[in-house]
Amino acid sequence: MIIDLLLILAGLALVVFGSDYLVDGASAIARKSGVSEFVIGVTIVGFGTSCPELVVSLTGAIQGSADISIGNVVGSNIMNTLLILGLTAVLAPIAVTPLNTKRDIPTMVGVTLFFVLLTLKGSLNWIDGVLFLLLFAAYMVVSLRSGKEEAQPEEEAQSRERGIGVAVLMVLGGLAGLIFGGRLFVDHAVAFAKAVGVSEKFIAITLLAGGTSLPELVTCIVAAAKKKGQLALGNIIGSNIFNILLILGLSSLIRPLSTAGMGTVDLAVLLASAVAVALAAYIGKHARINRLEGALMLALEAGYLVWLSVTL
């Protein structure tokens, strides 16, 4: 059991460091194309920080652990929104643009609601997976087309500092860390859960979701410290959309995923977390998610974790 715990930590370290290298390398490549800070957050950073969830959920699907695949996404999205975005807003209020309120936030809420409704039929099959992937592709195309702008001088300087060859190597090295780390993490987290008599669902929603959400947490804290709220918001919205549409889309193509393990409270909190972002963005005189709203998100996350500890 101690060996399992040590290998979980080793896998987590590989996942976190792999994500860090992947995001840095991909961002260096992306900045040369001159896209907006938010779009970089939604696409490159959102994808990079969602890679741990991708690896964990795909591995779970391959091994036939639907609770791992779905529970990891549900738990990660809840943590992304309530814990990470809430903490980021407490550290520094996050400005919300008109495009965020018209397109990005409604898309996240709509995708979350669509997923919750699909879970009512008991499983996600390959048809659902294809539909998820088509929606994902459409959102990415729209985001990239609308997000083009001239790169800022400091961004161009950063691009020149890191050559394309180095950036590609960082991406490949980051992916390797994610793949091997994710496999270690899943295998030994499940083994540890079974050894202590804890359900896979609990491990997926807490340990796996928390571990795979660390890249989002680190990215958003750094973004808040540098007053880059749009990057943080784009990271969370992008990650949440990636998690549902891309990760569950691919996972359900591998094999049908039973949703029976997800309880009503889990899905209700997931939907409430997305709605909370919308309410924070639309309510109030200033278009931003302020410290009070961030604190309320943190309180909701704390309440959910307490409920989990009592009922599971």
Image (cartoon, grey):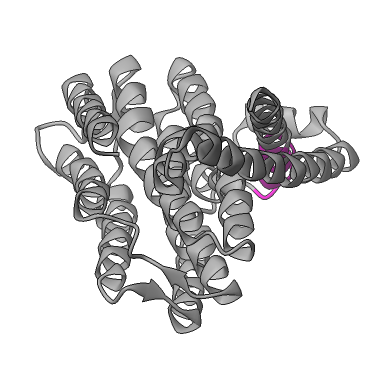
Instruction: Say above or below: 294 vs 165.
Output: above
State the quadrant of the C terminus: top left
Of residues 253 and 105, the one nearer the viewer is 253
Residue found 42% across the figure and 51% down from its top: 71
Q: Is residue 183 left or right of residue 197?
A: right
Q: Which residues make up the magenta segment?
A: 22-33
Residue found 20% across the figure and 36% down from its top: 287
Of residues 216 and 263, the one nearer the viewer is 263
Q: Residue furthest left?
A: 284
Can you give x and y, in whole percent of width and height, for residue 177 in the image? 76, 39
Residue found 25% across the figure and 50% down from its top: 101
State the quadrant of the N terminus: top right
Can you give x and y, in whole percent of width and height, for residue 18 in the image? 72, 35
Asked whether residue 39 is drawn in magenta, I would say no
Residue found 82% across the figure and 45% down from its top: 172
How would you classify the magenta stretch by its main secondary structure?
Answer: helix
Q: Residue furthest bottom?
A: 127
Asked whether residue 218 appears in the rendered view, the answer is: yes
Q: Is residue 162 left or right of residue 17?
A: right
Can you give x and y, in whole percent of width and height, for residue 52 in the image? 60, 44
Of residues 192 and 95, the one nearer the viewer is 192
Q: How many marks?
A: 0
Instruction: Say above or below: 105 vs 66.
Output: above
Asked whether residue 289 appears in the rendered view, the answer is: no
Q: Is residue 203 left or right of residue 254?
A: left
Q: Is residue 279 left or right of residue 67?
A: left
Of residues 224 and 311, the one nearer the viewer is 311
Can you give x and y, in whole percent of width and height, for residue 262 in the image? 31, 56
Asked whether residue 23 is drawn in magenta, I would say yes
Instruction: Say above or below: 276 vs 107.
Output: above
